[in-house]
Image (cartoon, coloured by chain):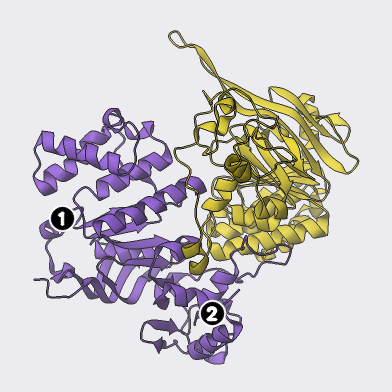
Chain colours: A yellow, B purple
């Protein structure tokens, strides 16, 4: 899995974030494998959607790429350098190119700073503009994200959630990054405001040639914004494909269930469709199930699933999935199960 | 007392205002609806639209001051809820009307075992003995699908996951077999797969126990599959009220139409820019004289900015607060639905 193709901006190779827990006087050390061997290529100019339930490690993966959480293994190749192993000072310099937008626009802005200072801080830190021109640069940024320049002296509490998210976006854009990790940027916002922020992100991407890693549990939003989608479950990527393919024909049983769980705003469809209800919660990452992590909730699980760890392989062109009950000749689990095919994949 | 046939709750011209430094906030300003036995009503709106205050008013849970129910009737099973003393309300609350909230962590007491919390309800309302209450608590936990219920009874709230905590809340809410369940954003804090479980559970329990449900949410997808009729609220007002199917297929209000169009639809091709309602929800303390939505509405005329819109009756069950309700409705019919 070390393919680095010419057009990828960022290549994540076997990235791991393991936390040690316990180890006190009476407890043994346990390892939480929040991110457990993730390999992903992110192409220049694309939006890669990352979906999964809470606790699956999607936010940790996003932070580990930017070294806001230290990876414990693997590589993040960007511009010929391995970000995972850069010294802190060099990494700080790199953050000019790699930025993050956070979920909670209330918690991620300093309440004691004016909007002007919040957006201006990265410009000053990286000396991207002379002192005299910082303010006009900030005003331009505010205009870009749809905030009136008159608000420059105001404090975060004077803004609504949607406006605060715009401030967060302006701050991320201040250093002219080419890659942005957007971690649940719309989840805390009202429905009518979500559409505004999604449109803003799309417009900025086109104007500034940005590449996004869009992390969300909202599959409708991911479907709308992303070119490709990666599905994560307990620290591993279990399916990866182009957005339209993954929604039209998900292959891995977890993805099938995840997509079927999304309520559709159409009563006629809701009345007709059969929803797959997964039983149980996401198992604890402290002690994940052996074999395929999903086997405890999977309606298609066979005894082999408890022992074999499935690898992420190409099942259809540009469509990878991790499940031992499917392969490229027999990609559909439902049919395979009906035909009584056992462990046919890898 | 209950001479109403089939109607469990009727709310008539309810107004709940809050006194703030900024002036009077008309959080709920004239809402009227009826809920029949066994029916599910959805109340949809953005934050600050008044959807939660409506239901807190029904439960008489509005903190007074600063809040006050200034007008309207709330008739629950023939009982005038507004006329009851606090003591009398307490007897209804939790027993005949139960409520579940968005965040089960903040509505459960973190210091008490869930057995204690579950048993308290039935001991208080149904006069259960300790043994009876414990047996009942166990039965309820099993009913809402908590695995290994017997041993889980002795756990504290933090030992449960979010979805499981919400199940505990539902078990508690349904302990006394309430006639009305008010669910305020019950799945907003949960993952989609868990949301699907909880919604299925509410649906199933409703069918088995015949409970009437008011489901408050901002998610149009959730109400589509769960409700028989819907109220859309904006700035404390009812903007549209219709049977679920009709609301989705032929909305008669520009705000409802905008909301429906701004949800990305997974069944449709991506790429095109998403429809967006411009601007921000208004400051409810300083509403303009005309329609509160006029500033964000793509079909607003001069009249919308100066004159408060009428609540137009489209047909027997369908109402819309808009100067151009009939035109919008006709438009929706022509378009054959919004999508």
- Which dot marks residue A286? none
The residue lying at 40 percent from left, 87 percent from top is B315
The residue lying at 65 percent from left, 51 percent from top is A168
In-front residue for pair A92/A301? A301
**Does residue A61 appear to the left or right of A55 in the view shown?**
right
Indicate whether B279 appears above or below A334: below
Task: Measure how far apart labels 2 and 1 are at the Cα level.
Answer: 40 Å
Q: Disc 2 is attached to a residue of which chain?
A: B
- Looking at the image, the residue that sits furthest to the right is A6
Q: Residues within 10 Å of mark 2 (few under 14, many from 20)?
A: many
- Identify the element where label 1 is drawn: helix
Residue B323 is situated, as x and y percent measured from the top left of the image, at: 48, 89
Counting every numbered tag in the picture gives 2
Residue A139: tell me if it is visible. no
In-front residue for pair B157/A270? A270
Earlier sequence position, callout 2 versus callout 1: 1
- Which dot marks residue B254? 2
Do the residues at discs 2 and 1 belong to one chain?
A: yes
**Does residue B254 appear to the left or right of B135 in the view shown?**
right
Indicate whether B330 appears above or below A179: below
In-front residue for pair B166/A155? B166
Indicate whether A63 appears above or below B306: above
- Identify the element where label 2 is drawn: helix
In-front residue for pair A227/B200? B200
Quarter the N terminus of chain B occupies: bottom left
Residue, disc 1: B90
**Does residue B22 appear to the left or right of B272 in the view shown?**
left
- Which image quadrant for residue B271? bottom right
The residue lying at 68 percent from left, 22 percent from top is A72
Q: How crowded is mark 1: few (under 14 residues within 10 Å), some or many (20 or more)?
A: some
The residue lying at 75 percent from left, 25 percent from top is A74
Residue A287 is situated, as x and y percent measured from the top left of the image, at: 51, 23
């Amino acid at each position: 899995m070390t393919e680095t193709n010419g057009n990828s901006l960022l290549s994540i190779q076997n990235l791991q974030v393991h936390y040690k827990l316990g180890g006190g006087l009476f407890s043994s050390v346990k390892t939480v494998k929040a991110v457990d061997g993730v390999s992903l290529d992110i192409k220049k100019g694309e939006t890669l959607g990352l979906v999964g339930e809470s606790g699956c490690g999607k936010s940790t993966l996003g932070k580990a790429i930017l070294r806001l959480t230290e990876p414990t293994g693997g590589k993040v190749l960007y511009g010929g350098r391995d970000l995972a192993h850069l010294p802190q000072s060099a990494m700080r310099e790199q953050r000019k190119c790699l930025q993050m937008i956070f979920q909670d626009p209330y918690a991620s802005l300093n309440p004691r700073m004016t909007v002007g200072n919040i957006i201006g801080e990265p410009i000053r830190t990286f000396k991207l503009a002379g002192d005299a021109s910082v303010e006009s640069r900030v005003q331009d940024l505010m205009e870009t994200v749809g905030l009136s320049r008159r608000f420059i002296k105001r404090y975060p509490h004077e803004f609504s959630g949607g406006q605060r998210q715009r401030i967060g976006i302006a701050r991320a854009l201040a250093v002219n990054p080419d890659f942005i990790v957007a971690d649940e940027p719309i989840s805390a916002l009202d429905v009518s405001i979500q559409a505004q922020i999604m449109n803003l992100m799309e417009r900025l991407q086109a104007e500034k040639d940005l590449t996004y890693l869009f992390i969300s549990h909202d599959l409708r939003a991911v479907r709308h914004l992303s070119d490709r989608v990666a599905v994560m479950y307990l620290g591993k990527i279990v399916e990866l494909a182009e957005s339209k393919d993954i929604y039209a024909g998900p292959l891995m049983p977890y993805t099938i269930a995840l997509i079927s769980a999304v309520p559709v705003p159409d009563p006629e469809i809701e009345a007709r469709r059969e929803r797959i209800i997964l039983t149980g919660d996401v198992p604890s990452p402290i002690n994940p199930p052996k074999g395929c992590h999903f086997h405890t909730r999977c309606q298609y699980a066979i005894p082999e699933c408890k022992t074999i760890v499935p690898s992420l392989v190409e099942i259809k062109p540009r469509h990878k999935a991790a499940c031992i009950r499917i392969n490229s000749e027999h990609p559909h689990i439902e049919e395979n199960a009906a035909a009584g095919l056992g462990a046919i994949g890898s | 007392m209950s001479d109403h046939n089939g109607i469990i709750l009727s709310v008539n011209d309810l107004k709940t205002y809050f006194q703030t430094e900024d002036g009077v906030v008309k959080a709920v300003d004239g809402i009227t609806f009826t809920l029949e036995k066994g029916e599910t009503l959805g109340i949809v709106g953005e934050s600050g639209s008044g959807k939660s205050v409506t239901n807190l008013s029904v439960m008489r849970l509005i903190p007074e001051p600063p809040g006050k129910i200034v007008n309207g009737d709330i008739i629950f099973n023939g009982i005038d809820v507004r006329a009851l003393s606090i003591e009398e309300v307490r007897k209804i609350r939790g027993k005949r009307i139960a409520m579940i909230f968005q965040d089960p962590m903040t509505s459960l007491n973190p210091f008490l075992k869930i057995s204690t919390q579950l048993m308290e309800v039935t001991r208080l309302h149904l006069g259960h003995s300790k043994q009876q209450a414990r047996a009942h608590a166990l039965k309820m936990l099993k009913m809402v699908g908590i695995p290994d219920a017997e041993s889980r009874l002795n756990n504290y709230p933090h030992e449960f996951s979010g979805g499981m905590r919400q199940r505990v809340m539902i078990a508690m809410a349904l302990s006394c077999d309430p006639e009305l369940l008010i669910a305020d954003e019950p799945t907003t804090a949960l993952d989609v797969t868990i949301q699907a479980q909880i919604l299925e559970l509410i649906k199933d329990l409703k069918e088995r126990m015949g409970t009437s449900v008011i489901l408050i949410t901002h998610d149009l997808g959730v109400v589509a599959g769960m409700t028989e009729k819907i109220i859309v609220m904006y700035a404390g007002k009812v903007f549209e009220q219709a049977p679920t199917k009709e609301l989705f297929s032929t909305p008669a209000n520009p705000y409802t139409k905008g909301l429906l169009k701004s949800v990305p639809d997974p069944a449709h091709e991506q790429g095109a820019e998403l429809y967006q309602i411009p601007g921000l929800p208004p400051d409810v303390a300083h509403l303009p004289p005309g329609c509160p939505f006029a500033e964000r509405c793509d079909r607003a005329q001069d009249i919308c900015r100066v004159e408060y819109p009428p609540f137009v009756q489209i047909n027997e069950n369908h109402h819309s607060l808009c100067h151009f309700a009939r035109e919008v409705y006709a438009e929706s019919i022509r378009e054959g639905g919004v999508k």
